[in-house]
Image: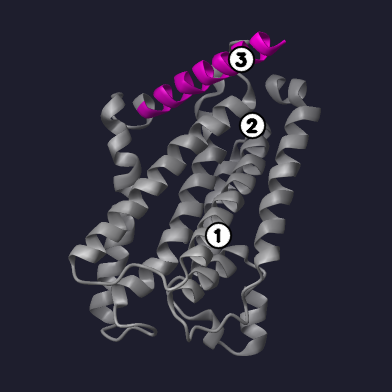
Amino acid sequence: MRYSFINALVRKQQVMSAVILRDMRTRFFNHGLGFALVPLWPFVHIGVLIIIRTVTDRIAPYGDGTAVFYATGLVPTLMFSYVSRFMGLSLVMNKPMLAFPAVHIMDVMMGRACLELAGACITLFLMISILWLLGQNPFPIDINQAIFCYFSTMLLALGCGTLVGIASLVMPIMVTVYALIIIILYLSSGTLFVASNLPAGIGEALAFNPLLICVEWMRTAFYASYSDRLVDRFYVLAWGVSTLAAGLTIERVFRRQLLEA
């Protein structure tokens, strides 16, 4: 039994490696080196937005660096957006691979998730390095909360991405619908404004967006005076766990119907 379990793990690793390599080749210029663009694309995205906000807002709402302030919002927001969106898109793009008996639905989505999460971590490293080289202080005052927030946002992205991916296999239009939802989530996430400074009613209404809580949570880890009145850690974790559980359950119960869709 021990050897059969190990063999199963080896086969799973081989399948996911094949999925990841196919994603890397087909997504960027049909070449494996296209992976270099996985972290560079969100990195450029973050960099352009930070430059725009730094030029237009010379005084940071908190701290001494405008770039660091906006990075604290953009890093979790764009990590969530890229991971969940491309997980949702993965089954539509790789549906022919499901014709192989060894390839399962979750192999495709988790392969894309691994690729995007690796890119997100590289993006984070590049962002911290460049801000530090520019004389900014990109390090949080509460490293534990910053790490907790980052991994909680990862969980949220995995959960939403799994659920959207399953839905898009049946209704490909969900990819477009979710792209529009991400725009709404981004604009209301507090990335480009301080949500805790809004009137109580507006702030609490926006706090139904779990991504806003992730941004507020990350900023409390960087700024001692930042208000945590909108931070509900359990709410973010509940969203992440419930969406992931729902996606996995639907995939398991309706696996045959999904493959025939």
Q: Which residues are magenta?
A: 1-24
Figure quadrant of residue 97: top right
Q: Residue at x 63, y 40 (%)?
A: 162
Whether 8 is among the magenta residues is yes
Viewer-nearest of discs 2 and 1:
1
Q: Relative to 148, does residue 225 appear above or below in the rendering?
A: below
Label ID, residue 169 = 2
Left or right of residue 131, residue 260 in this image: right
Marks 2 and 1, the one that precedes in the sequence: 1
Q: Element at badge 3?
A: helix
Query: Mark 3 to mark 2: distance in Å?
Result: 30 Å
Query: Mark 2 to mark 1: distance in Å?
Result: 32 Å
Q: Quadrant of the N terminus?
A: top right
Q: Which residue is mark 1?
A: 148
Characterize the local packing of mark 1: few (<14), some (14-19) or many (20 or more) Cα atoms within 10 angstroms: some
Mark 1: which amino acid? Answer: Phe
Residue 133: image location, x then y, percent: 18, 63
Residue 19: image location, x then y, percent: 48, 23
Q: How many marks?
A: 3
Q: Residue at x 66, y 35 (%)?
A: 166
Q: Residue at x 64, y 46 (%)?
A: 159
Q: Is residue 91 visible to the viewer in this orientation of the structure?
A: no
Q: Residue at x 23, y 77 (%)?
A: 55
Left or right of residue 167, residue 120 in this image: left
Q: Which residue is mark 3?
A: 6
Residue 48: image location, x then y, percent: 27, 62
Figure quadrant of residue 44: bottom left
